[in-house]
Structures are given as structure tokens and as C-alpha cells.
Image: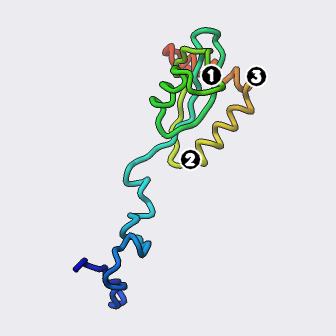
């Protein structure tokens, strides 16, 4: 017979039913599984080598995402590549990365975006800010 989990109250769960059918937290794992996996979300800026345009996005796997951009699997960047990573910021949760993406997109085309790109170029060339 299958083992059933006995909660702290001392009353066993319904015997004979696997934990996954009960929807119990032990089957689903910890609520904080992202922390255990150290899953990070990244906001990134890529630049087209072909026409020097920028694209801003967020993802949990930057390398895979850039591969998709270069493989023309994204409608917004299709036939505009190859793309290179210019800048990235890491965040603990998806919402923070998404909010930063939206903030940078609001900069795009304006003075704040040009300042950010200038700062990125200075940092990548080893210049002092």
C-alpha cells in the first residue's frame, strides 16, 4: 500500500489516494521553487549588426532568446539580424524585469534612451563614467 502523508495534526490523509491526486503541497513542491532553482529574469537590449536598430525585451533565458532572434523566430526582429547583446539587467522576479523593459521602451527614441546607450558604450569600452 502507498504511504500517505500524515500532517502535524496527526490525522492521516485519505488512504489509497496518491498525493498528486490530493493536490497536496508536498507533491507540487515548495511554493518558492524559483528560489531553489535560482531562476533569474533578465531585461536585455540587443542591436542589429545589419541596420544598427535596437530591440528591448525580457526573458528567463537570454542565450536561448538571442538564438531565437537570430533564427528569425520573432516577428519583430525577423530578417533584421544578426543580433548582438548590448546590455542586460538581472531581476529576481518576472514582474520587475517586465517593468524595467517597459521603462526602457518608454525611453526609446528619446534623450533618456540615447543617454543609456551612451553609458553602455562607455562602460563596454572601459571608459570612466
Q: Label 3 to label 1, Cα distance in Å? A: 17 Å
* Residue sitting at x 37%, y 89%: 9
Q: Label 3 to label 2, Cα distance in Å? A: 25 Å
Q: Which residue is mark 3?
A: 109
- Horizontal side of residue 18 vs 113, given as left or right: left
Q: Which mark is residue 94?
A: 2
Horizontal and vertical percent position of residue 118: 63, 18
Extreme-top residue of the structure: 50
* Residue sitting at x 52%, y 43%: 91
- Horizontal side of residue 96 vs 18, given as left or right: right
Q: Which mark is residue 60?
A: none
Give the camera-side residue of 56 and 113: 56
Q: How many marks?
A: 3
Counting residues from the N terminus, which is met first, the one under dot 3 or under dot 1? 1
- In this view, the mark in front (3 or 1): 1
Give the camera-side residue of 105 and 75: 75
Counting residues from the N terminus, which is met first, the one under dot 1 or under dot 2? 1
Per the image, label 1 sits on a secondary structure element best described as loop
Give the camera-side residue of 119 and 36: 36
Q: Residues within 10 Å of mark 3 (few under 14, many from 20)?
A: few
Amino acid at each position: 500500500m502507498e504511504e500517505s502523508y500524515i500532517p502535524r495534526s496527526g490525522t492521516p490523509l485519505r488512504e489509497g489516494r496518491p498525493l498528486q491526486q490530493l493536490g497536496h503541497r508536498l507533491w507540487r513542491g515548495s511554493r518558492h521553487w524559483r528560489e531553489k532553482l535560482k531562476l533569474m529574469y533578465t531585461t536585455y537590449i540587443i542591436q542589429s549588426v545589419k541596420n544598427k536598430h535596437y530591440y528591448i525585451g525580457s526573458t528567463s533565458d537570454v542565450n536561448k532568446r538571442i538564438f531565437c532572434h537570430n533564427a528569425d523566430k520573432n516577428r519583430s526582429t525577423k530578417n533584421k539580424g544578426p543580433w548582438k547583446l548590448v546590455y542586460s539587467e538581472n531581476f529576481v522576479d518576472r514582474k520587475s524585469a517586465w517593468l524595467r523593459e517597459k521603462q526602457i521602451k518608454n525611453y526609446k527614441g528619446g534623450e533618456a534612451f540615447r543617454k543609456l546607450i551612451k553609458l553602455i558604450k562607455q562602460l563596454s569600452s572601459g571608459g570612466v563614467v
